[in-house]
Image: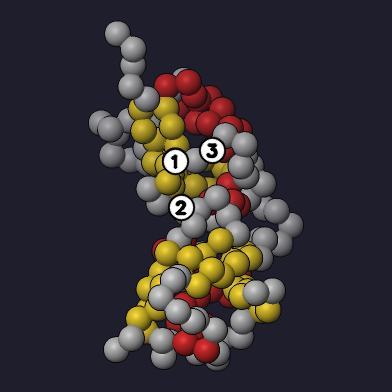
């Protein structure tokens, strides 16, 4: 079975996915939805400016030995509603804390909320989602943050 690789751009995270050339775009979107934890119905993939339909076979638009680069668009939640995401403010705490955010909330704004709600100074930690460090200036939608996601807090090393 021949496999093809895809690099998915469009946000601050760039997932890489590998699947058989016989797979459909819907199967690619389902796999991507599992990786970034977003409903498939909110995902649109484009290749060279063309929107891909769910019934297309990925082998049709992938050529060569290099990963195909696809662009991902995630349909925003209607009305930019607030929703809960979860963080663990310390390694000794096993129960995640719910933080209310919107897709338009920036990482910096989230850090301030964590500081206010958990008492952890924003200067002492870095946020990660799906293994990627999050940049202050990006909105949460750039990291495909959706309701119920868990964002990791990594304490920064201290200078002695």
Residue highlighted by disc 3 = 135
Circle 1 — which element? Answer: strand
Q: CA distance from mark 3 to mark 1?
A: 7 Å
How crowded pointer 1 is (Cα within 10 Å; few <14, some 14-19, many 20+) is rated as some
> Residue at image x 67%, y 46%?
104
Q: Earlier in the sequence, mark 2 or mark 3?
A: 3
Q: Is residue 122 above or below residue 12?
A: above
Measure how far apart labels 1 and 2 are at the Cα level.
15 Å
Whole-percent x, y for residue 58 in the image:
49, 84
Asked if 27 appears above or below 45 in the picture, the reply is: below
Q: Nearer the viewer, mark 1 or mark 2?
A: 1
* Residue bearing mark 1: 133
Q: Which residue of the protein is positioned furthest toward the front in this rendering?
A: 64
Callout 3 secondary element: loop
Q: Nearer the viewer, residue 116 or 103?
A: 103
Q: Which picture quadrant has residue 86?
A: top left
């Amino acid at each position: 079975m021949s496999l093809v690789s895809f690099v998915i751009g469009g946000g601050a995270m760039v997932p890489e996915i590998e699947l058989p050339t016989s797979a459909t775009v819907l199967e690619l979107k389902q796999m991507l939805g599992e990786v970034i934890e977003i409903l498939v119905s909110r995902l649109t993939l484009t290749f060279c400016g063309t929107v891909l339909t769910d019934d297309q076979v990925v082998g049709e638009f992938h050529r060569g030995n290099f990963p195909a680069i696809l662009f991902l668009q995630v349909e925003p939640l209607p009305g930019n509603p607030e929703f809960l995401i979860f963080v663990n403010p310390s390694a000794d705490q096993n129960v995640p804390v719910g933080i209310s955010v919107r897709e338009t909330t920036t990482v910096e704004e989230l850090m301030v909320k964590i500081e206010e709600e958990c008492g952890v100074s924003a200067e002492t930690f870095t946020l990660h989602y799906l293994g990627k460090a999050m940049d202050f200036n990006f909105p949460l939608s750039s990291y495909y943050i959706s309701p119920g996601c868990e964002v990791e807090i990594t304490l920064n090393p201290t200078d002695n």
